[in-house]
Amino acid sequence: MPTPSNSSTRNCNQMPPILTVEGLTKTFQMHHLGQSLMAFEDLSFTVSPGEFLLLSGPNGVGKSTLLRTLYRSYLPVAGQIRYDSREGVIDLAQAADIDIAHLRRTEIGFVTQFLTARPRVPAEDIVAEPLRLAGHSRDDALKEACHWLKTFGVKQDLWRAYPTTFSGGEQQKVNLARALILPQRLLLLDEPTASLDVGAREALVTRLADLKSQGVAMIGVFHHAADVAHLIDRDIRLKPKELSDVA
Ligand SMILES: Nc1ncnc2c1ncn2[C@@H]1O[C@H](COP(=O)(O)OP(=O)(O)OP(=O)(O)O)[C@@H](O)[C@H]1O
Ligand SMILES: [Mg+2]
């Protein structure tokens, strides 16, 4: 049985899918318990350019695990994740690490609420980095970085400072600016609004609406789902699974 119950709230997109997930299954081996934990089983769905899928379900149901599996931080135990890249269709479940690294730089973004702050790297350089890696000049990248830091509400006197000492919310804003500065083709979002103030949440929703209108496909878990209600095309609801004995 497929685990999600897909309820269509809007069907505005007739484009062919950019992502086709079929029979996706992920388990975790709990060696210390002698059990395996089924995160999700036989999951199938598609996402088209410009479509926004809300991923919902109770705590521990596997939402973050699904996003991490799509991003290939986790390997699934079964199923396909066919992604229609600029260079052709590739199964993310089977792709070589080097191809995954390339896609993460150029086409597939992952947005969490946590910044991986590096010691002695100023906020503006952290945010500008994706543009620098994409070949933009340092000046252009920094200008754009400052625009997004301002948009997400990071005070100007912090732009040259090191985010390792920032508050949780300030770090989250730097993280969002970095994650969304360069439009990707597929964006995976794991509770990006948790602990953001209202101004930053509004800025984020505006940016996501803009990216959607540019054709970016998005799959996201949202702490404040009402914020993005007007963007949601479909809702994938994951249902709880039981622990099962290791075979
Ligand atoms: N690396 C791991 N090893 C073992 N079990 C894991 C691992 N990652 C997640 N799990 C388990 O998988 C299940 C799903 O976790 P996941 O983080 O995907 O839930 P979630 O739906 O995102 O929950 P929340 O709403 O609390 O964020 C949980 O029971 C969790 O304990
Ligand atoms: Mg989660």
Image (tube, grey):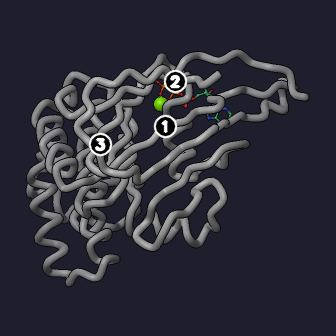
Number of marks: 3
Q: The residue tagged with tag 2: helix, strand or loop? A: loop
Amino acid type shown at disc 1: Phe
Q: Nearer the viewer, residue 130 or 83?
A: 83
Amino acid type shown at disc 2: Pro
Task: Identify whether 236 is placed above or below 189.
Answer: above
Residue 61 image-quadrant placement: top right
Q: In the displayed structure, does residue 194 sit left or right of residue 38? A: left
| Sequence-earlier tag: 3 or 1 | 1
Counting from the top left corner in percent of width and height, residue 21 is at 54, 43
Q: The residue tagged with tag 1: helix, strand or loop? A: strand
Residue tagged 2:
4
| Sequence-earlier tag: 2 or 3 | 2
Q: In the displayed structure, does residue 242 sit left or right of residue 222? A: right
Counting from the top left corner in percent of width and height, residue 238 is at 51, 22
Q: Do the numbered discs 2 and 3 sit on residues whose CB atoms are within 8 Å?
A: no
Residue drawn at the location 72% of the way across and 26% of the way down: 37
Q: Nearer the viewer, residue 33 or 91?
A: 91
